[in-house]
Amino acid sequence: MNIRLAKRSEKQTVIEMVNDVYYTSERKFWSEGYYRIDENDFERYIANDWLFVCVDADDSLVGCVLFKQESEDTTSFSMLVCHPDHRKKGIGRKLVDFVTSKAMEGGNQYMQLEILSPKDWVHEEKKFLKEWYGKLGYKLVREVNFKDYYPDHSIYMKCELIFSLYRKSLLGR
């Protein structure tokens, strides 16, 4: 497995993989027409060197992660995706370790992430993710209404959604 910056030539593959994974996982959140990433998003991520992909020995895409500098001392990652055919192989953990190392190399003190989940019921995959990130040292900082972040996407919502913001100190690692 190799992790590297995404290439423009991978646009359609990345967009399809990300949207398929998110829509499958979050189908009870969204109506038809919802997308997690579109071509404009992809181009912005590529232009800023924010999008990293994980490829296998054949250079086939098996996962991706978005990694951004949020402030002088804080980075974030999001859109952590593993291709469904390659789950349970440690790809998610490799991607998290990769962005954590990049954050530390850049002198950052904190890493943060957001998990989208329904406000009024438990989504088992999101529950698993919250527990998994907790084991990796992430602590819940706050929860905010999804509509406040992405009002344009609210037309696709089937239920009330919240973002749970998690943060981890990178000091002393």
Image (spheres, rainbow, N blue to C red):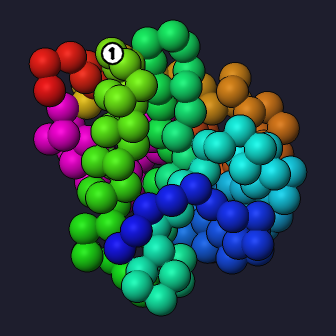
Q: Is residue 132 magenta?
A: yes
Q: Name the residue rendered at 25%, 75% in the picture.
A: 88
Most foreground residue, 169 or 6: 6
Q: Which residues are magenta?
A: 112-137
Q: Please name the amino acid that badge 1 sits on.
A: Gln
User: How many numbered discs, if any?
Assistant: 1
Q: Quadrant of the N terminus?
A: bottom left
- Up/down of 82 relative to 130, above or below: below
Answer with the quarter of the image where residue 2 lies: bottom left
Q: Name the residue rendered at 80%, 57% in the picture.
A: 38
Answer with the quarter of the image where residue 56 lies: bottom left
- The outermost residue toward the front is 105
Residue 24 place in picture, x, y as percent: 55, 72
Answer whether residue 105 is visible to the viewer in this image. Answer: yes
Q: Is residue 71 left or right of residue 137?
A: right
- Up/down of 136 relative to 12, above or below: above
Q: Is residue 48 left or right of residue 130?
A: right
- The local secondary structure at tag 1 comes to loop
| Residue, disc 1 | 109
Q: Name the residue rendered at 55%, 25% in the picture.
A: 69
Answer whether residue 81 is visible to the viewer in this image. Answer: no
Q: Is residue 8 left or right of residue 130?
A: right
Residue 136 place in picture, x, y as percent: 19, 40
- Up/down of 164 relative to 4, above or below: above
Q: Quadrant of the C terminus?
A: top left
Residue 21 place in picture, x, y as percent: 55, 70
Answer with the quarter of the image where residue 115 lies: top left
The residue carrying pointer 1 sits among few (fewer than 14), some (14 to 19) or many (20 or more) residues within 10 Å by Cα, namely some
Most foreground residue, 101 or 144: 101
Q: Name the residue rendered at 26%, 42% in the picture.
A: 133
